[in-house]
Image (cartoon, rainbow, N blue to C red):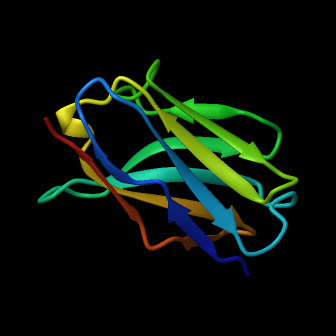
Amino acid sequence: QVQVVESGGGLVQPGGSLKLSCAASRSIFSISVMGWHRQAPGKEREWVATLTSNGGTNYADFVKGRFTISRDNAKNTMALQMNSLKYEDTAIYYCYAREKAVTYWGQGTQVTVSS
């Protein structure tokens, strides 16, 4: 089992940047997949990005070229660097870790893009 906790959300102007962090309760070395989803007000939760244990990354089309996912196995953390933020990026961002067909979710961190 693993617990994950997000941090780094906040209020940012359009075009600005934020870096989200996801801290795990134990070593993430053996966790095969980690990633981010988000849920905007009144919308369903949607996938944002994935990072595998061998370094493979995948991004939703709406964040490609703007967001970068990374992990630090030594610190048991994963990050989502978000640049060129748009109004439509406003959402609660959820970190997840998937191990042995079980997915563990964080509680989410709010990102608000507003002028």
- Residue at horizontal 52 percent and vertical 71 percent from the top: 105
Front residue of this view, candidates 72 and 16: 16
Quarter occupied by residue 5: bottom right
Quarter occupied by residue 26: bottom right
Asked whether, in this view, residue 52 is left or right of residue 16, the answer is: right
Furthest residue to the top? 65
- Residue at horizontal 56 percent and vertical 62 percent from the top: 96
The percent position of residue 65, horizontal first and vertical second, equals 46, 18
Front residue of this view, candidates 108 and 37: 108
In the figure, 62 relative to 112: above or below?
A: above
Front residue of this view, candidates 20 and 39: 20
The percent position of residue 37, horizontal first and vertical second, equals 43, 53
- Residue at horizontal 72 percent and vertical 33 percent from the top: 56
Furthest residue to the bottom? 1
The percent position of residue 75, horizontal first and vertical second, equals 81, 56
- Residue at horizontal 24 percent and vertical 33 percent from the top: 13
The quarter of the image holding the C terminus is top left
The percent position of residue 78, horizontal first and vertical second, equals 66, 51
The quarter of the image holding the N terminus is bottom right
Asked whether, in this view, residue 49 is left or right of residue 98, the answer is: left
Asked whether, in this view, residue 33 is left or right of residue 48, the answer is: right
Labels in figure, total: 0
